[in-house]
Amino acid sequence: MSTSINNSEVSNSRDNSTPQIQDVGLLHENSMLQVSWSDGGRDIYPYVWLRDNCQCPSCFLAVSGSRVTPLRILLLEEKPVHAQVSACGSHIDLEWQDGHKSMFLSNWLFDRAFNNQRRTQRYEKTLRLPPVYWGSELLDDIPTSSFEEVIANDKALLKWLTQLEVYGLTLMRDVGTEGGQVNILSRRLEDIRRTHYGTVFSVRAKPQPNNAAYNSGPLPLHLDLPFYYHTPGIQVLHCLKQASSGMGGESEFVDGVHVANKMREESPQLFEVLKNTAVDWWDVGTDEYGKFNKISQQPTFRFNHRGDIIGIQFNQAVRDSFMDASPQEVQLWYHAYKLYANMLYDPDNYISWKLTPGTCVVFDNTRVFHGRRGFQGFEGERELDGIYLDWDEARSKRRVLNNKFNGVHHESTSGEQQY
């Protein structure tokens, strides 16, 4: 059967259940397969995509979820000559011009439909959970977990990882005041990110600090380590000691993406300047692990293919004096950068509180700014243990646990298909 594509008829509204396949059509003029579903919806699939993703044992290794066929032998213009729906609508069989045969399950095709709703659902349920942006109102409702429960219970770990991804800021209670607790958390996630400051770093005042965090003065709002192209995505800070009551040391946090989205609405031209102007970030020096010389050149905002901000680079202390821009562009950039900095400190966007010993704050280092008010006291009076983690590993763990408890299977596997 051959019909033309009518984009208005392609399904964009579905519930979460998988309908059965009712009919298929070979649209040779468009090189598309049209699938009609039992719920009344229709989707179209490119022939070349179907052939590239053939699930037969000769083309696909199910145990590893990987293709076997080399791309160089893929025929871009190959067409199926026959398409057949199974009696119960659970799968379709295709026969290609060269005699090759493919079979696709209904749920496999439905999950991979190219309509906008299905693509968005997959992105937001699997790749990156939709963020909840916040301002000063979060202070009374910061997501909080029990450290002991997160370490011992997978459901508690999944809840915490979900909150961390959605809000970008979480607290843990009952962590204790002994050192090494951050290592226990990193082992729970099977991940720790080493930098030139080591794996575990201590945030406390030092006589000769090599980092702005290692003194007792105020620490302006910033994001850590923008001089890495692959910036550590998550920071963990465990409070071991705190400055005496009334002596300062409050922690400060701002949802930087929330503020950036406000800037995009209120000052779109200056927002575009920060989006498009590369900035040099650098850190050069010596720590206990030796000399280091880290440099990156990145704009303030980083985006995904959907136009959403998925990362921010901002750190006044390690912004270099080199700029790959014209003098006029530099002048305009300063106006944009200063506006964004001022917006970060707007009381509507800003929260602060004093960490108590035995608590741990975990936050998204690509989204949530942190800072510290200056404190008075002797060396080592205020002390925090810190580590970095990567979002790739955290999201991987969240997906694994979500599959375990909610029965959501990895989209790249096809299930048991018989030939």
Image (cartoon, rainbow, N blue to C red):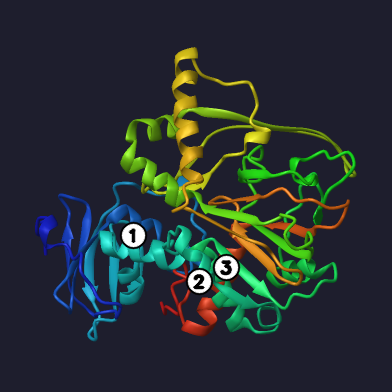
In the rendering, at what x and y percent does residue 335 appear?
45, 27
**Amino acid type indicated by mark 2:** Asp
Residue 100 drawn at (x, y percent): 36, 63
Q: Is residue 171 visible?
A: yes
Image quadrant where one finds the C terminus: bottom left
Residue visible at 47% across and 19% down in the picture: 331
Locate residue 281, reporting x and y percent: 64, 32
Whole-number angstrom distance, CA of label 3 to CA of label 1 = 19 Å
Q: Is residue 17 left or right of residue 237?
A: left
| Circle 2 crowding by C-alpha within 10 Å: few under 14, some 14–19, many from 20 | few
Residue, disc 2? 141
Separation (CA) of disc 1 from disc 2: 48 Å
Question: Which residue reaches farthest top?
Answer: 327
Q: Position of residue 165 (x, y in %)?
A: 52, 64
Q: Is residue 63 visible?
A: no
In space, the residues marked 2 and 3 are separated at their CA atoms by 42 Å
Q: Earlier in the sequence, mark 1 or mark 2?
A: 1
Q: Quadrant of residue 357?
A: bottom right
- Residue that mark 3 sits on: 64
In the rendered structure, the answer to whether residue 73 lies left or right of residue 250 reads left
SS of the residue at dot 3?
loop
**Residue extending furthest toward the front:** 246
Which of marks 3 and 2 precedes in the sequence? 3
Q: In terms of secondary structure, where does tag 2 sit?
A: helix
- Residue at position x 66%, y 37% in the image: 227
Q: Nearer the viewer, residue 336 or 219?
A: 219
Label disc, if present, on residue 50 of the rendered structure = 1
